[in-house]
Every structure is written in C-alpha cells, then in structure tokens.
Image (cartoon, rainbow, N blue to C red):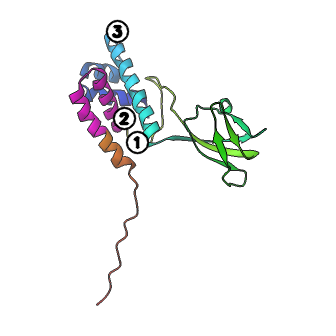
Amino acid sequence: MKVKDVIIKACDFVACDELEEKLRKGESLSEEDENLKNKLVKCFNLVREEIACEYQPILIAEKFEIKNFKLELKSFSNEVVEIYSIKDRYGRNVHYKIFDNYIFVCGKDVEVIYSTSPKQLTFDDDFSASLPERIFAYGVAREYFFLNNLYQDANIWEERFKGSLQIMLRQKSEVKIPRRSWL
C-alpha cells in the first residue's frame, strides 16, 4: 500500500478536490497545496502510530546473548515500546525485570518479543498493513479536522474510523450450529 493512495482518498473526505486531482495526475503543486499535502502526511503518521500503539502492535522478535544478566535497551534494533515475552532457546519463558536503561534477564541465549512504534513515512513511501486504505483515510480526515479546530466534523470521522477499526479487528470465531437430532 502507498501513503500517496491514502492521502488521495483522504482528500476526497476533507473536500480538497483540487489537491486530489493534482496528486492523481502527478502535476506540480503550489506552495499552499504542498503545505496541505505535508499536513495530510503528518495526519497519516499520527493515525498509523495510533493504530500501532492501541490496536495492532508491531511485534518484533530478536535474539540476544546475555552477559552479566543485563540486556541493554540500546542494543535493540528498534525502539522498544513494550516487552511481550522473553524465552530461552528451548522456548521456555525466562524471568526478567525492566529498568530504565536495561532489562535484568535470568537466562543466557534468549529471544525477546517486543512491540515498537512505526517509523515516520513520507508521501512516496510504501507500507504494509492488514487494514484497508479507507480506514487509514478516515483517520487522516479525523486528524485533519482536529488540527483545523473543526471538532464536529472530526467527531463524525472519529466514529467512522473507530467503528471500522472495531469491525476489522474483532475476533473472528468459527460459527458452530448444533446438530439436529432426528425425532
């Protein structure tokens, strides 16, 4: 999925028809249009971060060799938001305690599963997501209206955004119908 496609769809929701047309055709933008595009990209990054922090965390698994029971937080390849589990090489949970700069780990070779925040994207970047771009565009519209102090419009898009997220992310379970018995 492309950030560009989400922004174009969001332009339709926030009534920026001129910008939408220019972006679709790849035309050059005026300074005002460029500022609006950058504002929408900022809104997109806010929405993406909200989804990652509250609804669909970005989980990463990394392996470490522990020395002196300390695992430095700076040794992770990404920013750590939350530790989900630490397991030894046999898949057993390892006891740990998190401090400001390090994690005290009772193990030697471990695998750490943690969540991270998404990287900031630009207009031309690609990203992967299990949600349709329409939901991202709802969130972008909401953020845009909030930034412009149009709270009534923002609340409308808030309802659409949250409602769509709940539908897409709810636990889907197998429907079981009891067998009919013969009389």
Task: Of the two numbered discs 3 and 1 on the same chain, state the one appearing first in sequence.
Answer: 3
Asked if the residues shown at circle 2 and circle 3 are in contact, with their CB atoms under 8 angstroms apart, the answer is no
Pinpoint residue 147: horizontal percent, then vertical percent. 31, 22
Q: Residues within 10 Å of mark 2 (few under 14, many from 20)?
A: many
Residue lying at the far right of the rendered structure: 68
157 magenta-colored: yes
Tell me which residue sits at (60%, 32%) in the image.
Answer: 78
Can you say which quadrant of the picture contains the N terminus?
top left
Q: Earlier along the polypeptide chain: callout 2 or callout 3?
A: 3
Range of residues picked out in magenta: 134-161
Q: Residue flagged by tag 2: what amino acid is it? A: Phe
Indicate which disc residue 136 carries: 2
SS of the residue under disc 1: loop
What distance separates the C-alpha of mark 3 from that of mark 1?
32 Å
Label 3 sits on a secondary structure element that is helix
**Please, which residue is most extreme toward the top here?**
31
**Of the residues shown, which amino acid type is indicated by label 1?**
Leu
**Quadrant housing residue 131:** top left
Left or right, 21 with respect to 57, comes to left
Q: Residue furthest left?
A: 152
Q: Are marks 1 and 2 in contact (CB under 8 Å)?
A: yes
Q: Is 48 placed left or right of 22 in the picture?
A: right
The overriding secondary structure of the stretch rendered in magenta is: helix
From mark 1 to mark 2, how far is it between C-alphas?
Answer: 8 Å
Q: Quadrant of the C terminus?
A: bottom left
Where does residue 18 sit, x and y in percent of width and height? 26, 19
Q: Which residue is mark 1?
A: 131
Q: Secondary structure at mark 2?
A: helix
Residue 31 numbered tag: 3
Residue at position x 27%, y 25% in the image: 145
Q: How many other residues sit within 10 Å of disc 1, few (<14), some (14-19) or many (≥20)?
A: some
